[in-house]
Image (tube, grey):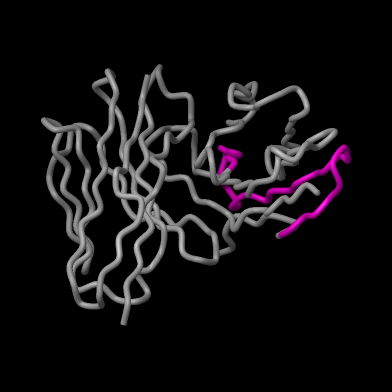
Amino acid sequence: AQKVTQAQTEISVVEKEDVTLDCVYETRDTTYYLFWYKQPPSGELVFLIRRNSFDEQNEISGRYSWNFQKSTSSFNFTITASQVVDSAVYFCALILHGSSNTGKLIFGQGTTLQVKP
Amino acid sequence: GAGVSQSPSNKVTEKGKDVELRCDPISGHTALYWYRQSLGQGLEFLIYFQGNSAPDKSGLPSDRFSAERTGGSVSTLTIQRTQQEDSAVYLCASSLGGRSNQPQHFGDGTRLSIL
């Protein structure tokens, strides 16, 4: 069975601090995709990034960066110099590829990030 | 362009009533998904439509739940004889195809409250 664990339920930081959101996943499949979504108070899930299981290269997009390590089954997300607008619930998700693909995203429980001014 | 549109935004109804939730996917997206988000269960997959293929209904929690997709576009999720445990936010998503590397784009959801 597949599972995504986000151990941090809530994180609170002060603006300009760096923060890392942890994501650990479980699957026996070798081909899969990982995603991060942001859910601001408005409720809409906003796609941030996808990563396939064969690409362990880290990615940076502005203040956001992602660290994918297959050896530890982790896909962590770091926000550098956090801002109040980063306050949201962040979800990590897994989807299988190929014949195992059922189309469904398997989500972690989410991490609520609060950035205080 | 327009994103995924869901209606109504909020729905309050009495226990035992039927409800219909609507989803209008992004134009050109062939895959459509319904998820449910509740406090105790997090985000749960409900059903998946891909083109003209038979839908994957494996996530529907009971036979009171059904969904259809007309003309390969708009989808309606129907809950019959609603129960209080059906209270949740129902999220719809669409993607360019059913391939797993295509990101799913979500609507704002319908917040359903059963009295």
The total of numbered circles placed on residues is 0
Give the position of the N terminus of chain B as an image quadrant: bottom right
Question: What residue do we see at 50% from left, 50% from top?
Answer: B105
Most foreground residue, B20 or A12: A12
Image location (x, y in percent) of residue B91 = 60, 47
Image position of A66 with respect to A82: above or below: above
Most foreground residue, A103 or B91: B91
Question: What residue do we see at 54% from left, 66% from top?
Answer: A42
Image location (x, y in percent) of residue B84 = 74, 40
Image location (x, y in percent) of residue B12 = 80, 54
Question: What residue do we see at 42% from left, 24% from top?
Answer: A101
Residue at the far bottom in the pictured view: A117
Magenta region = B10-36
Quarter assignment of residue B94: top right
User: Relative to residue A99, is residue B85 drawn left or right?
Assistant: right
Image location (x, y in percent) of residue B55 = 63, 25
Most foreground residue, A109 or A49: A109
Most foreground residue, B67 or B45: B45
Q: Verify whether residue B77 appears in magenta.
A: no
Question: What residue do we see at 48% from left, 24% from top?
Answer: A102
Quarter assignment of residue A96: top left
User: Relative to residue B28, is residue B15 drawn left or right?
Assistant: right
Image position of A44 with respect to B90: above or below: below
